[in-house]
Amino acid sequence: MTTFEQIEKKERARTKTLRTVTYILLTLWAFIVLFPFYWMLLTSVKSYSAYNSEYVPKLYTLAPTLQNYRDAFTAVPLAKYFTNTLIFTLSTTAIMLVVTVLAAYAFARLKFKGKDLLFTLFLALMMIPNELVIITNFVTITDWNMRNTFLGLILPSVTSVFYIYLLKENFEQVPDELYRAAKIDGTSDLKYLTKVMLPICQPTIVTIIILKVIECWNAYVWPRLITDDAAYFLVSNGIQEIRENGFGRENIPAMMAAVVVISVPLIILFLIFHKKIMAGVSRGGTKGS
């Protein structure tokens, strides 16, 4: 065996060992991440009596039941919380998308005095702690008498500096020649945006929509501050209310069933669109020539 063949054999063995170690570590990490979801799902199908009789928690159940899911919907207005969250999520995402697209297009393609300075100041907003923004928004919404209203829930969430920045970087990857050709043909900026820019940048836009939906669905702090009327509770606040009113503390399996019901839509959404999310983020974060 020649020296070259020996080196090649050692390199293959090294690569195989490295790959094996990587897979073992990834498997261990996947187990750590997924175990809480498994435990949540398992608890949700255990009967109330079976759960309370377990002095040592079991990692399985021989008598799964769906009674906990029925209890979760009948004991508390979980369907109402779902409806509120759906209204909040769809409305906020739609308005945010319009604001983000128009702002990103203005910073990426339009020319106006002080654009670079304005965008720098705009990015500086990301440095402001979220707690300060929440305090300011709370005072504003309260002064406008918008507490316990959908408008009060939605308004502070209709813009995002990060999403505007992400989409602006994506818009700037579109060749300038397309824009100049469109202007020569007499195409308006709005038509160029809708007919050219949006189709080309579709992966990033889909990513922004999905991330915003997840953000709205999981919103907790702001809805908790601005609403104290159960008629406007979102699912996250509804779960907290379930826990605080005693039902969730007494009936843990039903509580876990409610959490499963709330979590499943986001899990399905991510599993369906995870490739688009990764593609959109990588595309928006890499500026072309």
Image (cartoon, grey):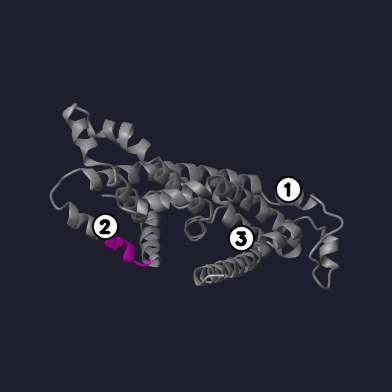
The Cα–Cα distance between marks 1 and 2, rounded to whole angstroms, is 47 Å
Of 71 and 266, the residue lying toward us: 266
The dominant secondary structure in magenta is: helix
| Spot occupied by residue 265 in the image (x, y as percentages of width and height) | 60, 47
Left or right of residue 115: residue 65: right
The Cα–Cα distance between marks 3 and 2, rounded to whole angstroms, is 35 Å
Q: Amino acid at mark 2?
A: Phe
Left or right of residue 5: residue 35: right
Task: Kindly report which numbered mark, 3 or 2, lies closer to the viewer in this rendering.
Answer: 2
**Camera sees residue 37:** yes
Which residue is at a point 61% across and 65% down the rendered structure image?
23
Left or right of residue 39: residue 270: left
Left or right of residue 173: residue 8: right
**Camera sees residue 151:** no
| Spot occupied by residue 6 in the image (x, y as percentages of width and height) | 54, 71
Q: Which residues are magenta?
A: 123-129
Residue indicated by mark 2: 122
Label 3 or label 2, whichever comes before in sequence order: 2
Determine whether 191 is above or below 73 in the image: above
Which residue is at a point 35% across and 38% down the rendered structure image?
200
Residue indicated by mark 1: 74
Which residue is at a point 37% across and 60% down the rendered structure image?
139
